[in-house]
Image (cartoon, grey):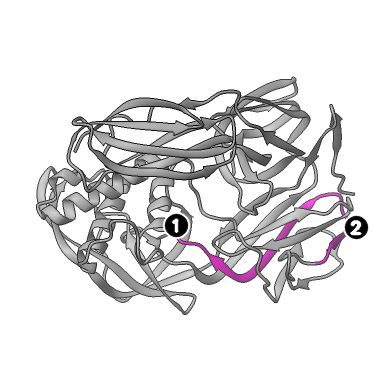
Amino acid sequence: MKRIILFFFFLLLVKANISVSQSGLSDAIVTGTGDGANVTFIDPHTNNSRQVNARLMLGTVDGNATKFYCIDITRTISFPDSCHHDSAVASSQIVYILNNYYPYNPNPAGKLSNLNKEIASTQVALWHYSDGVNANTVTDSVIRNRTLQIIADADANAGFTTVVTTMEILPSFDPDAFYVRTKDQNGNPIAINGIQLSISSGSLSSNIENSILPAGETPDVYVIGTASGIIYAEAQALIPQGISYTCPGSQRLVLALPTIGTLKVNADWGALPVELASFNASVSGRNVDLKWTTSSESNNSGFDIERRSAEGNEWTKVGNVAGNGTSTLTQNYSFTDRNVLTGKYNYRLKQTDYNGNYEYHNLTSEINVGTPNSFSLKQNYPNPFNPTTKIDFDIAVDGNVKLTVYNSSGKEIATLVNEFKTSGYHSVTFDARNISSGIYYYKLESNGVSKVMKMTLLK
């Protein structure tokens, strides 16, 4: 019988879940190239000048029309190509670009008027992260400058961006049952019919279920006649952009648009690889300190720390802590989530083993990051910057807030904030792609108090 172990520590509840692994079974057929342009740059693998087709690729996933980018300049591809299968998740920077630029976002900030050059710039930015292409060697100045903008944006903001898990097996509060949750590419619940269920030993109370709105969850399914086994769930589900497709000897591709395809999830029903003895949190200003202890570990690669707004559905990875492999000794862990904005949040640990299987440990107590004690303006980050930078500021009392940028001559060039703000920790991004390099000053004013800081734009 499967048991979900509950530990109570200082009114904080820890729930140990079943181990989960998500993999796709989808096949891609690439039929040709679409919009884009030829681009010349220095190939980092040969150190020679090379002209490359920087275009979207057209094709299908399990018969559904979609588009791909290339993330491999060392191999070639011939059309039609029908040997690609989904294989992994691309890097955080690549997923960030795919989430925020064409074609998923048809109108990104700073989009070029020439769509072919916009697509080519996005493709070269992806090659920067997949193959180490130096964007400064691109011969076309328009594509070069746009590529550098996209790279700067990804460097500053990608963080731990990853694709959304669109189908997952989760433990029910009934220790003998589980359910399946399905989501779209934004993390919102969706309904999917015909989810096929099976287990490697024993049996299930149902072998086919539908996920139902508003939660996007199936009814509970009971495990019968076994204390351990592997649960499988398979369906035609949403595969998000950022999933890579590989074929031996051919170019590696990455999905540029969310597409319906065959998705399979498995979960380890049985003994948990990590026994969590405690998991608690405390707040210090804008920082949330998380501490947890394990009483035993088996094959533990590490923990991803994930956070979401108490009012939202989407979890965001905010950090990672390495595990201790296999151990029967008590192990203590800690992580500080820094500079969190005012609000209420949930946290969870995603523990992953060396085979890629994972389980969640939830901190069910809500964490409240309150308001600051004083007015404060922080140094922008990054600094120097090009073309975007983030400015954090603290407001202790509700009131009108104005944040203005000036050049070295004292001329106002941008107003970033000019509105009523509640007390709390706030952040704003300054986009300087349309101004020249130099020293700039930013001034925060609120409730009769002001402060000025200096920043440097280098292009």
Instruction: State how far apart marks 2 and 1 are (Cα).
Output: 39 Å
Amino acid type, label 2: Gly
Amino acid type, label 1: Gly
Position in image of residue 126 (x %, y %): 31, 52
Structural crowding at the residue carrying mark 1, measured as other residues with C-alpha within 10 Å and reported as few (<14), some (14–19) or many (≥20): many
Query: Measuring 9% from the left and 52% from the top, which residue is drawn there?
Result: 139
Instruction: Identify whether 152 is placed above or below 376.
Output: below
Of 46 and 195, nearer the camera is 195
* Residue 257 part of the magenta-drawn span: no
Residue at which label 2 appears: 225
Structural crowding at the residue carrying mark 2, measured as other residues with C-alpha within 10 Å and reported as few (<14), some (14–19) or many (≥20): few
On residue 242, the disc is 1
Q: Main secondary structure of the magenta part?
A: strand
Of 286 and 282, nearer the camera is 286
State the image quarter where residue 285 is shown.
Answer: top right
Query: Measuring 85% from the left and 60% from the top, which residue is drawn there?
Result: 202
Mark 2 and 1 residues: CB-CB less than 8 Å, in contact?
Answer: no
- Which element type, helix, strand or loop, lies under badge 1? loop
Query: Measuring 9% from the left and 46% from the top, which residue is drawn there?
Result: 48
The answer to whether residue 381 is seen in the rendering is no
- Left or right: 331, with 434 as reference point: right
Q: Reading the chain from its start, which is encountered first: label 2 or label 1?
A: 2
Stretch of the chain drawn in magenta: 219-242
The label nearer to you, 2 versus 1, is: 1
